[in-house]
Image (cartoon, helix red, strand yellow):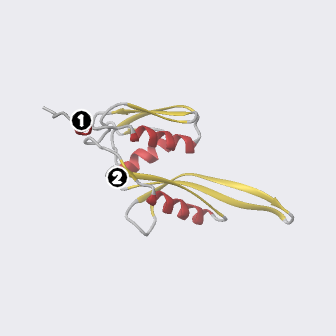
Amino acid sequence: MASDGRGDNPESVVQIRRCACVVKGGRRFSFTAMVVVGDKKGRVGWGYGKAIEVPLAVEKAVKVANRSMVEFPISETTIPHQVIGRFRAARVLLLPARPGTGIIAGECVRAVVESAGYTDILTKSYGSNNPINLVKATFDALSQLRTRDMVARLRGVEVG
C-alpha cells in the first residue's frame, strides 16, 4: 500500500490491465487500473482509471475512489453480522470473526475490508474470480450491513 500524496488515505491497487490497439506503426498500449482507497475507520471507495501509462491510470483511479467513498459500520474489529454480496457472477460471503483471527480473504476482498478498517473477518468468494466483480460484490455485501442501533432506529423501537 502506498500513499497518494494528496490525502492520508492509503491506496491499494487491485488490478492493472494492459490493452493493445494495433495501428499502422505497430501496437499502441494503454493501461487500466482498479484501486481501493480507505481510511481504516469504516470509509472506503473504489475507482477505475485508464491512461497511456500505469502511474497515470493509478492516479486517475485514486481520484475516482476518493470521490466515491462510502461509510460502513464496524462493530469493534469485525462486521456486525453475516452477509452475502452479489455482483453479476461473483458472490462474496462475509462472516464476523473473533478478535485475533485476522483477515481471511483473497486478494481483492482483502483490499476492500483492510481499507475499510476491519481486522477480524472471514470471507469466501463463489462464482466469478474477476477482480472487478469481486470488489463490487464486496461493496454490495458491506452496504447490507446494519448495526443493532440502526435496525432499532429503522423499526422505531428502543434497544433494551
Q: Where is residue 84 in the image (x, y as percent from the top left)?
A: 43, 31
Q: In which quarter of the image is residue 67?
A: bottom left
Q: Where is residue 91 in the image (x, y as percent from the top left)?
A: 51, 32
Label 1: which secondary element: helix
Label 2: which secondary element: loop
Q: How crowded is mark 1: few (under 14 residues within 10 Å), some or many (20 or more)?
A: few
Q: Which of marks 2 and 1 is nearer the N terminus?
A: 2
The residue located at (61%, 62%) in the rendering is: 54
The residue labelled by disc 2 is 40
For the residues marked 2 and 1, what is the alpha-carbon distance in whole angstroms?
Answer: 21 Å
The residue located at (29%, 43%) in the rendering is: 74
Q: Residue furthest bottom?
A: 6
Side of 28 relative to 2 (left or right): right
Q: Which residue lies furthest to the left in this view?
A: 160
Q: Position of residue 64 (x, y in %)?
A: 50, 59
Asked if residue 1 can be seen in this view, the reply is no
Q: Residue furthest right?
A: 24
